Every structure is written in C-alpha cells, then in structure tokens.
Image: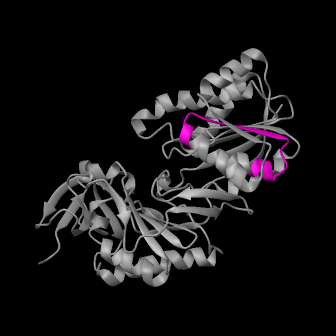
Amino acid sequence: MPQARIYIIDTHDRVRNGHPWVFGTQVSKEEGNYQPGDIVQVYDAKHRPLGQGYINPKSMIRVRLLTPHVQERVNSAFIEARIERAWQHRLRMGYTGSCRVVFGESDDLPGLVVDKFNEVLSVQFLTLGMERWKDVVIAALERFVKPTGIYLRNDVPIREKEGLPLEKGFAGKPFSTDLVIEDGDGVRMHVDVAGGQKTGHFLDQALNHTAIQRIARDRQVLDCFTHTGGFALHAAKGGAREVLGLDISEEAVRMATSNAELNGFEQCTFKPTNVFDFLTDADRTGKRWEVIILDPPAFAKSKGALENAYRGYKEINLRALKCIPAGGYLVTCSCSQHMSPELFRKMVAEAARDAGRRLREVYYGTQPPDHPILWGVPETHYLKCLMLEVR
C-alpha cells in the first residue's frame, strides 16, 4: 500500500530547517490511509518533500520526522543503523561506563531515550510511533551495546497523551535494579533503575558537577534542590569545609545521605525543607554561605507556564544572592527547555540588579556530549548552568 502523504504549512521554514516536529495545526491536507504510528511522507504547501516520520492523530505533535528524505526506506535496518550510530558517537566521545546512549531527536530517534548505568540499560519509549519499533530497538541495543540487562521505564505521563499505557518492567531476564555508579571524577552514587527519577538517575549534570570542585575548596556550601546530592557530593570531593543539601523530598534526602556515606563525605548534611522558605528565613536571620547552588526541577514544563516560571526562577535567585557574601559564588541552573539560554541570563541579571549585586561569570556549562544539542531543535538545548562570582 502506498504511503500516506501529509501536506503542511511550514511557517518560517521551521521544519525545512531541521526541526522534526509537525504540529496538527500545521497540516493543510492529507492523502491516503494510515494507522496511528505508521510512517508517512510530509510535503510543504508547494508539494516540496520535507521527509518521513511516524504519525499519531491523538498527539499535538502530529508527525515526528525520522529522515528528511521521502525515498529512504524506514524499516528495521533503518532503526538498527540509527541505534548503532548513536552508540558509536558515545564511544568516540570516550563513554564506556554510565551515559546516555540515545537522546531522542538529537539522535534522529524521536520518542526514544536510553540510559546506560554500568552494564544495564534503562529505556523509555515515549511515543506511539517509537513503541511500534520496540522489539527492533531492544534487539539492536542488545546487539550493539551488549548490556547485561534492560529495564523499561515506560511510566512517563507523556505516553498517556500518545494513547499509551504507563508501565515498567524488565525486557528479558530480571536483574538487581539497585546499582552504584560513578558520577564523574570518581564520586559514587546509588541508582534505582526501577524507582528513581526519569530513567533512574540524571546523567546530564556530570560535567557541571565536576566543575563545582574549582570553587568549593575550604568553603561553606549550600546545595538547594539537591535531589540525590550530585552537586553537594562533588563540592565535598573538591574539599568544601561544610556542605548542607536541601530538598523537599524526604526520599531524595535519604538517598543523598546514603550517597555521602558511600563516599565517606562526613562534611555533608542533608535535610528535607522548602528551599524558598529556607532562603527567606536565612536572609532575615543573616545566615550566609560562600557558595550557593540552585538546581531546581523544571519550573516551565510548557510555554504557557513560562511567565510564572520566570518569576519563580527570579525569586529563588534573588533570595540566594542575598545570602552570599562578596567574593562568594552563585551556581544557578535551569533544566526547562522553554527557558532559553538568553532568557535565563536575563532573569539572573534582573535578580542581581534587584539584590544590588554585581556578577562575574567564571563558568557556563550545559549538557555533556552524550546529550548532544541538535541545531535547529532548540528543545534539545535545555540545560543551563552558570557559576558566578558575587560582588
């Protein structure tokens, strides 16, 4: 049966310039029959080819392109080749231990995330179109990466928008899902592949975690939104005099405490608390830290939430800046894809102005090479990390 054709209005040539998402509002005409998850050909309003991708009428993103070529055959061999290419990139970048093996759109496999923790893989199929290739993907991962086990973390809410159930479990033989990995520069961390956040652990801050050691030696450090203690542990590794980690989640605090014990970092203390309230009280009572780290969860989970998120980011940065003495450092991060690097810098600058502080940038980091940024797809450049000397 011939492939269905989708004709779209490509405002500002966004798709032609490399963005793989075709929204339902862009579709002007459809030709032929298809089932949700099928591969379709996409053309612009002038009938010029834009590529092929899988379609799902239930999703706001109607088509996710896999290739810009309408004549290329999208079959099992195609998917296998993409998996192999993704893994070869990680090997070229020097990754052999824990890393991200497949990063969705950045690896031309939209809807697929694969993380490697030691010798096991944690896999997420986020979309119907990628779910249709599940058996092929798993077989290719086993062939090229050669893991000792694979765990499926298909418990992500975005699957419901794709008409998919939330589920998780082993793909193949069971194994222990409680692991200990190295998170850059020899710091060891517990990872719960079955129950941890996302795929079990955040790997994207690895380079920024290591960079904190440059400014932490002999300093008193406050790590806000510490989660499982990534920044706090690396500050201790760098010789921090005292480290306090805060998180609203008691389970996260328990895990961070366990991670500190695992590494023998006795200068680390963790407590469950509301960071906003804590910093407000610290400013009122005159408490100060020479290094304050802000690594909050994504405040802006949609474009519609960006205005409120901007205010939230600014408020937390403002409160932190008031608790840092001259010569100290603010380390501030955002993992919201809707908060662009330019907007993030603007927000921090406004917070500094309102706090009456001047800032000198000493480091800017983003994702490591196993989370590559695909030009033309700004959503893949989601992580921002600034280290700023406060004056």
The total number of labels drawn is: 0
Percent across and percent down for residue 116 are: 53, 68
Q: Quadrant of the C terminus?
A: top right
Residue 189: name its quadrant. bottom right
Asked whether, in this view, residue 140 is left or right of residue 342, the answer is left
Q: Establish if 209 lies above or below 72.
A: above
Residue at 71% x, 25% y: name it.
353
Q: Quadrant of the N terminus?
A: bottom left
Query: Can I make out residue 212 in this image?
Result: no
Q: Nearer the viewer, residue 272 or 159?
A: 272
Percent across and percent down for residue 125 are: 36, 62
Asked whether, in this view, residue 291 is left or right of residue 33, the answer is right
* Residue farthest to the right, as pictured: 218
Q: Establish if 282 lies above or below 209.
A: above
Residue numbers of the magenta segment:
234-251
Asked whether, in this view, residue 198 is left or right of residue 2, the answer is right
Percent across and percent down for residue 39 are: 24, 70
Residue 99: name its quadrant. bottom right
Q: Nearer the viewer, residue 176 or 226?
A: 176
* Residue farthest to the top, as pictured: 284
Residue at 23% x, 58% y: name it.
56
Percent across and percent down for residue 339 are: 53, 41
Please check the rendered image and state whether residue 248 is part of the magenta-colored stretch, yes or no: yes
Please check the rendered image and state whether residue 258 is part of the magenta-colored stretch, yes or no: no
Q: Establish if 323 lies above or below 169.
A: above
Residue at 83% x, 45% y: name it.
240
Query: Can I make out residue 183 in this image?
Result: yes
